[in-house]
Image: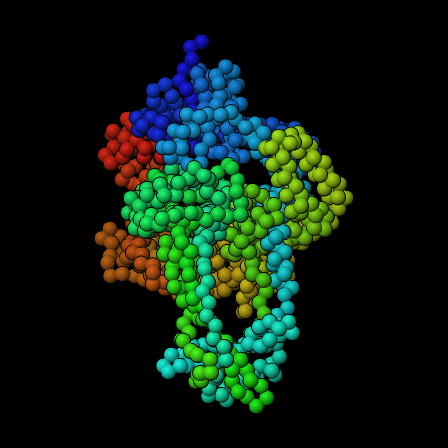
């Protein structure tokens, strides 16, 4: 049989496009195979997958939760199924006659498994073509070219480690999720989700909340005095030597604090008893590994998941190295001078990089962890311009660049000045101390502005000098409970305890948010989360044990090293899970009762104003949420909730009604609804703002359109004759509505403007409410093409002129041909649209 082109397989479409561009020197074209982008040049074809296109699952006969006991999943066979049918079909079609196949997926455990999945799909249709593996840490011209010139074999042990994780996670997650949900009779969209890594992570968060709840604050006092030399004033703090002869500032006895204050307040001068100067070296930071990158990104406002998502996009574009790494030591083949030289040519970092090139010796810092897979995260020598990236992408890219610059910069130098002064009193001579610091040499701070360089001024004084005491302060304080884990600190703790991997930890945290187990930032557990952890601890502590999941992570590493097999680890996990079910089955009824109580507590809003029962969050038959009395049908009191989002209860309660505030989880549109009774009462009291005649009944019955506040907290423009006339138009929930002097010629209605208390938000001129809604409907129904990121109304119209009426037509179009028909649109843009449509 005649063999066809060489086939290159990457993990994602954008990686395929970039690699094809590099290997073809920019000459690669594109075609669509089964709705999937394929890049071609010479005798080569390159296709991008969409991560895992094959997944593990139980056979279909295990899918009915009610007919299959959860424990049966422990020993059930696991099978592989395509999860992306169109991509799998395209891959098989291209592989059938391929003369050679090259796997170019990401170089980590998951990437190796994705490569193995692709290998198996290839072998189903082609048993003869050689299959090679290439590995790289950045998608740059140099690394990609070198990788393809030195191909290797797939690491089946590393892939097996990834496959073991898939199977173990499926077994634990599916069986325990079903058992807990069925025991609590909590099915549908609100089932109780449990996972191998999810459970121990949730316990970490719940345990910290327990520490906070159990914390008993202690009172203490601190004292301060302002000292002055000539016209220069600085603050000093009272201190004493405790039982261990160490300096202490907190005074635990109020009487002692008052006595010290009386002495300080009566004093007019303090005598300098000690002056000590020292110089401190402030070493530059170590290179970024994944955990430290996430920590630094959180400092500039990015969640763990968002930071990693942006870093992965920057990696695929060739601007940074692979972002999933434990390494904190640059490899020997990285020449920092060469990279600095490349960065010096860029517009934003040129001066900083050039200044570092002046050094005679450039020796990067090193961290504690050195691995051989990927280097620490650092920029490549392929530089984007700010216009190539979004604002968020540029901010994260700058963080990575500046971290690299910091690691090859000099240490900073601080000068510290410690001054101790004493005050003469009749019964005691209180001591005061002031610590000044001045940045003498900024060193790495000049290129890395993410660490504080604040100074504290203390004037030069000499021992024996008298300083004026100008003001004294006694501050009563209390000890504070431990802080909740921020996302980055939580990931560091998970890493220390062996929970999860660098590739999964941020996703696990996001899943806890998505399931309603945690809310806020830093994350705090909901009452459902507490209930799941409490039930797990009481009836099967392995579910939330970090020892279990850490052991499994170690077993997977053993597989990767060839010291264990996939069967060894999955069999061991099955045995462990069977022991868990032995305990669970014996206490199923008690477990269910516990979970139901927690679920009810998580939905109990507070006391019903019309009965002795509680108000709880309920769900109607059409799926919407509302607040209803638990005494129904004897009490029919209800309150509406917003139609957007899923409600969770906050700890804050309304001082007037004793009801918990409600928060509506809706992704980026998440908002706090507050007390539902307050919202309803406010809507009842807020007067309608009359806009003009109702177009449905104004002429006949005199109905008028008015801006109305709904009891659910929303707002609309509706007829004053409701319910006899149900004409209505949507309105934004937030902001103050006012009428403008401009009138619509078609409907003879004034315009509406929305203003915001936040001065940073510009007013929103909606104009005529009828015209505004008509435009909204046109945007919604105008074309499904506008659901694709980057396609607006005008571009959709151009696409229609080119014969593309819908998403299906866009996916079937040939990018180069379509781009030729649309001004201002290139083939790559079309391919991006097609990838988004997939």
Q: Where is residue 44 in the image (x, y as percent from the top left)?
A: 38, 21
Q: In the picture, residue 279 is in which quadrant? A: bottom left
**The C terminus, quarter of image:** top left
Left or right of 337, for residue 189: right
* Residue at screen point 39% across, 52% down: 409
Query: Visible in this render: residue 352?
Result: yes
Left or right of 269, for residue 160: right
* Residue at screen point 28% across, 57% down: 751
Q: Position of residue 158 (x, y in %)?
A: 56, 31
Q: Note whether 33 is above or below 462 in the view shown.
A: above
In terms of depth relative to the viewer, which is nearer, 230 or 28? Answer: 230
* Residue at screen point 49% across, 41% down: 324
Q: Note whether 620 is above or below 226 in the view shown.
A: above
Query: Visible in this render: residue 624?
Result: no
**The N terminus, quarter of image:** top left
Outermost residue on the bottom side: it is 426
Q: Position of residue 718 (x, y in %)?
A: 38, 55
Outermost residue on the top side: it is 1
In terms of depth relative to the viewer, which is nearer, 420 or 140? Answer: 420
* Residue at screen point 34% across, 59% down: 761
Outermost residue on the right side: it is 586
């Amino acid at each position: 049989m005649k063999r066809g082109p060489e086939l290159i397989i990457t993990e994602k479409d954008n990686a395929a496009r970039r690699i094809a561009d590099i290997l073809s020197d920019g000459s690669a074209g594109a075609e669509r195979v089964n709705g999937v982008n394929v890049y071609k040049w010479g005798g080569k074809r390159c296709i991008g997958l969409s991560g895992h296109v094959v997944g593990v699952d139980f056979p279909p006969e295990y899918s009915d939760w009610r007919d299959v006991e959860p424990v049966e999943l422990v020993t059930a066979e696991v099978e592989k199924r395509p999860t992306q049918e169109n991509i799998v079909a395209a891959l098989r079609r291209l592989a059938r006659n391929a003369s050679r196949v090259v796997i170019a997926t990401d170089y980590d455990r998951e990437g190796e498994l994705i490569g193995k999945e692709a290998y198996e799909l290839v072998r189903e249709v082609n048993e003869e073509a050689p299959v090679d593996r290439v590995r790289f840490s950045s998608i740059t011209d140099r690394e990609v070219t070198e990788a393809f010139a030195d191909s290797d074999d797939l690491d089946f042990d590393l892939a097996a480690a990834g496959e073991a994780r898939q199977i173990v996670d499926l077994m634990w997650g599916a069986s325990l999720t079903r058992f807990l949900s069925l025991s609590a009779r909590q099915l549908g969209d609100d089932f109780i989700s449990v996972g191998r890594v999810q459970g121990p992570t949730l316990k970490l968060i719940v345990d910290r909340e327990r520490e906070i709840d159990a914390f008993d604050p202690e009172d203490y006092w601190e004292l301060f005095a302002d000292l002055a030399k000539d016209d220069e004033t600085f603050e000093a703090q009272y201190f004493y030597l405790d039982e261990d002869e160490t300096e202490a500032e907190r005074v635990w006895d109020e009487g002692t604090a008052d006595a010290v204050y009386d002495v300080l307040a009566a004093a007019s001068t303090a005598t300098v008893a000690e002056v000590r100067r020292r110089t401190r070296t402030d070493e530059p930071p170590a290179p970024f590994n994944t955990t430290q990158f996430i920590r630094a990104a959180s400092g500039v406002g990015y969640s763990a998941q968002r930071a990693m998502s942006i870093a992965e996009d920057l990696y695929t574009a060739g601007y940074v190295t692979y972002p999933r790494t434990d390494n904190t030591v640059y490899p020997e083949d990285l020449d920092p001078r060469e990279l600095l030289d490349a960065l010096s040519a860029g517009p934003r970092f040129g001066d900083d990089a050039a200044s570092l090139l002046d050094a005679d010796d450039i020796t990067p810092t090193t961290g504690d962890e050195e691995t051989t897979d990927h280097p620490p995260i650092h920029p490549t020598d392929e530089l984007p311009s700010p216009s190539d990236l979004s604002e968020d992408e540029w901010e994260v890219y700058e963080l990575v660049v500046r971290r690299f610059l910091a690691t090859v910069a000099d240490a900073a130098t601080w000068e510290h000045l410690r001054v101790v002064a004493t005050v003469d009193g009749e019964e005691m001579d209180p001591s005061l101390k002031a610590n000044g610091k001045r940045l003498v040499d900024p060193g790495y701070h000049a290129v890395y502005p993410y660490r504080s360089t604040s100074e504290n001024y203390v004037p030069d004084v000499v021992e024996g000098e008298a300083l004026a005491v100008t003001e004294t302060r006694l501050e009563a304080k209390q000890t504070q409970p431990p802080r909740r884990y921020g996302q980055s600190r939580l990931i560091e703790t998970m890493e220390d305890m062996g929970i999860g991997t660098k590739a999964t930890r941020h996703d696990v945290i996001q899943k806890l948010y998505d399931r309603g187990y945690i809310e806020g930032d830093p994350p705090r557990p909901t009452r459902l989360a507490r209930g799941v952890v409490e039930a797990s601890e009481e009836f099967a502590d392995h579910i939330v044990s970090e020892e279990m999941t850490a052991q499994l992570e170690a077993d997977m590493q053993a597989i990767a090293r060839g010291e264990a097999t996939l069967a060894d680890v999955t069999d061991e996990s099955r045995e462990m899970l069977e022991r868990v079910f032995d305990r669970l089955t014996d206490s199923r009824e008690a477990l269910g009762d516990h979970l139901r109580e927690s679920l009810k507590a998580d939905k109990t809003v507070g006391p019903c104003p019309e009965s002795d029962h509680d108000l709880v969050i309920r769900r109607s038959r059409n799926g919407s949420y509302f607040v209803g009395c638990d005494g129904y049908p004897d009490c029919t009191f209800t309150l509406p909730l917003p139609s957007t989002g899923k409600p969770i209860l906050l700890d804050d309660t309304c001082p007037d009604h004793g009801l918990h505030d409600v928060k509506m989880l809706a992704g980026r549109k998440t908002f706090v609804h507050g007390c539902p009774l307050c919202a309803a009462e406010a809507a009842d009291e807020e007067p309608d703002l009359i806009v003009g005649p109702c177009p449905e009944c104004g002429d006949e019955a005199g109905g008028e359109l008015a801006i109305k506040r709904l009891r659910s907290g929303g707002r609309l423009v509706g007829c004053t004759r409701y319910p006899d006339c149900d004409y209505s138009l949507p309105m934004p929930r937030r902001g103050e509505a006012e009428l403008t002097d401009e009138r619509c010629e078609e409907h003879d209605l004034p315009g509406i403007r929305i203003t915001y208390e936040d001065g940073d938000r510009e007013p929103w001129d909606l104009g005529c409410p009828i015209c505004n809604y008509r435009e909204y409907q046109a945007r919604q129904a105008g074309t499904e093409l506008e659901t694709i990121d980057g396609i607006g109304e005008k571009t959709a119209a151009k696409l229609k002129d080119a014969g593309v009426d819908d998403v299906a037509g866009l996916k079937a179009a040939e990018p180069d041909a379509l781009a030729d028909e649309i001004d201002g649109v290139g083939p790559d843009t079309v391919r991006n649209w097609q990838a988004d449509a997939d």
